[in-house]
Amino acid sequence: MSYTYSNNQYLPYNELIGLYNWEILGYSSEERPILSTSIGTGARKICIWAGMHGNETTGIHIILELIELLQSKQIDLTDFTLHIIPVINPDAYVRYTRRNGMGVDLNRDFRAFQTVESAKLIGWIRMNEPELCFNLHDQRTIFHVGGTSAFTSLLVPSSEVTREITPQRRAVMNRLGNALAAMEHNLSGVGRYTDEFYPTAVGDYLMSQGIPNILIESGVAKGDLNRSQAREFGVQVIINTLKSDTEECHVYGELPVNQQGQLEWVFTNVLYAHMRVDVAVKRVVAMNGHHKAVIYTVDDLGDLASRPRLYEIDATAVGLAEALIVDRPITGDFGSVVFEDGIIISGSLEE
Ligand SMILES: [Zn+2]
């Protein structure tokens, strides 16, 4: 395997298929192959999947990097067999959207199993009888921990509404905590995802069935909108969790719960229709052929001082003539950058 998409660029599905000697587990609703592979011969079974939401692609890169590390013998996981699905929802992946080809969110179909993709996934998990699963997603840029962007959020899901820490859940928390401690990584920017119980979500359903699992949500950090930091961290979390044991450890429980409300770019103090306002701009990414296209939209405007942000630009000298409409592509001359219908036509934004 020669994997050259290290900066998390969008990997066309046809290229992913050709990148490795995958097996075909089944077909999506639009009859794209759902790829899988198994690596190793150890007795301890692990299931790892990504691409449940097609516009969340960091997990696919985490998986490809893991495969490369195993193949080049840079890591040794002799006791384990890794069962892997790089993209469980290929129809959404090729469109870079959340929902499957039938318009259903697989992460809300994990009780009825009416989509072919979620039926395949649960059948594959049950067949492999894993001791632990890793469920890889990307989180939106709104998440922060105490004002610092949450570059990764982790969750050991609840198994029922009271969110009780059952012995099984405690064991997974311990194992993950020991892994985080062993990594000696600065955990600033690592959050815990809410453990509110969602009966139709994959991780919660699996816990309710006694199948232990960890959700890894890859996010952005300041200066890293491509989520490279999250990708590297995700790979290390998986490797170290496999190596760690369930001795009592509270590192996971001590992670701060992530919060919402973070903005991307904020232009402060803009003169706009006789007012002084802060203008928040965000990126919206969609597919244009085989390439991701970026559109910048108005996220919010007004007094945004209380909201954390990734980037702030003093725009006291800026006077805007154009109307700002929330959720619409932005037009306006902000001095260091000029937007027209959501496209940058001169200057640039820090990423
Ligand atoms: Zn997701």
Image: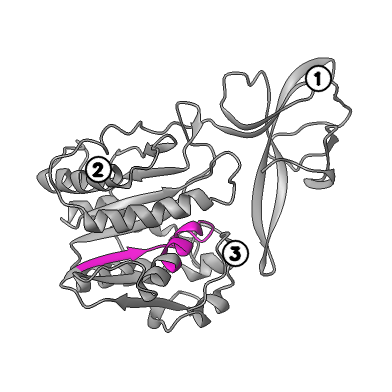
Q: Is residue 213 left or right of residue 218?
A: left
**Which residue occupies the foreground of this view, 108 or 290?**
290
Mark 2 residue CB less than 8 A from any atom of ligand 1: no
* Cα separation between marks 2 and 1: 46 Å
In the rendered structure, which amino acid carries the disc numbered 2? Answer: Gly
**Which residue occupies the foreground of this view, 248 or 160?**
248
User: The magenta stretch spans which residues?
Assistant: 45-64
In the rendered structure, which amino acid carries the disc numbered 3? Answer: Tyr
Q: Mark 3 falls on what kind of element?
A: loop
Circle nearer the N terminus (3, 2)? 3
- Identity of the residue drawn at 49% across and 46% down: 219
- Identity of the residue drawn at 10% across and 45% down: 167
The label shown at residue 316 is: 1
The label shown at residue 261 is: none
The label shown at residue 177 is: 2
- Identity of the residue drawn at 32% across and 66% down: 75
Q: Is residue 102 magenta?
A: no
Using a 10 Å C-alpha cutoff, classify the residue at mark 2 as few (fewer than 14 neighbours), some (14 to 19) or many (20 or more).
Answer: many
Q: How is the image coloured?
A: one colour
Q: Is residue 99 left or right of residue 346?
A: left
Q: Position of residue 338 (x, y in %)?
A: 84, 39
Mark 3 residue CB less than 8 A from any atom of ligand 1: no
The quarter of the displayed image where residue 122 is located: bottom left
In the rendered structure, which amino acid carries the disc numbered 1? Answer: Thr
2 vs 1, front mark: 2
- Identity of the residue drawn at 83% across and 35% down: 336
Q: Position of residue 66 (x, y in %)?
A: 39, 66
The quarter of the displayed image where residue 341 is located: top right
Q: Is residue 319 left or right of residue 143?
A: right
Establish if 165 lies above or below 107. Answer: above
Does the residue at mark 1 contact the one at mark 3 (Cβ under 8 Å)? no
Look at mark 3 in the image and give the residue it sits on.
10
